[in-house]
Amino acid sequence: MTDHFSRALQLLASGQLDKGRELLHRCLQLAPENSHACLALALGYQRAGDLLRAREYTMQALAADPRNPVALKNLGAIFGQEGDSLRALYYLRQSYQADSKDPQTVYGLAFAYMELGDMEPAQKHFQAVLEMEAPEELRGLARDGLREIVVAGRNQNDLKRRSKIFVAFASNSSLLRVQSLSGRTLPKV
């Protein structure tokens, strides 16, 4: 199963989503309670745009490991992608409680607060991302979020939407987190 799991992660990372998901389904046939395989499968579906299945397998991963910060963050990202900012905020807060040092979670919180029009905590969390050792792409998104808050302060109707960018970034970085949680790393493809 370990070989299937490692190969599946390589396939997902290289964009071969169908093949990666197929191997992960085999892993789950061998070990149905494997939360890492469930989460990786959820990420594969999320990257393919099948949010219903992504949510299903993320919930399955959470059933096996209810405080898994990656699963909580990804469930928040899925709800955010679906436009349900309240549920996104709920799961992102739980992820933050489990791992307050994850820049993607902090960014997700900021974005969810901004979507809900609660600019003070949004600004606080965007600023926190800038103070973290976050990837430059995410730092740029946080700077954009801070600028949008300034614009929103001038004209609430001009608030731009950035959820697709966040979800894509969160999905890709979460795949790397799944690898580290499973104790394996992928070779560069």
Image (cartoon, grey):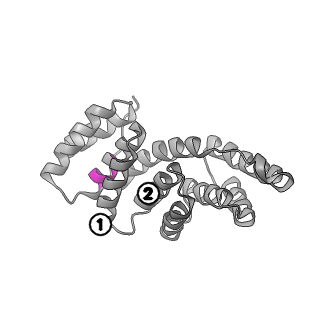
Q: Residue at x 40, y 58 (%)?
A: 71
In the picture of the structure, the residue carrying the numbered disc 2 is 75
Q: Is residue 142 left or right of residue 177?
A: right
Quadrant of the rendered structure where residue 66 is?
A: bottom left
Q: Residue 188 in the image: state x and y as whole percent.
A: 41, 32
Q: Residue at x 27, y 50 (%)?
A: 37
> Number of callouts in the render?
2
Which stretch is magenta?
36-40
Q: Is residue 126 above or below residue 64?
A: above
* Residue nearer the viewer, 12 or 188: 12
Magenta span has 19? no
Whether residue 91 sits left or right of residue 106 in the image: it is left
- Circle 2: residue type: Leu
User: In this image, 64 relative to 117: left or right?
Assistant: left
Q: Quadrant of residue 164?
A: top right
In the drawing, what numbered circle is on residue 63? 1
The image position of residue 14, as x and y in percent, is 38, 30
Residue 182 appears in view: no
Residues tagged 1 and 2 counted as in contact (Cβ below 8 A): no
Look at the picture and state if 86 lies above or below 74.
below
Q: Position of residue 137 (x, y in %)?
A: 63, 40
Q: Secondary structure at mark 1?
A: helix
Q: Amino acid at mark 1?
A: Ala
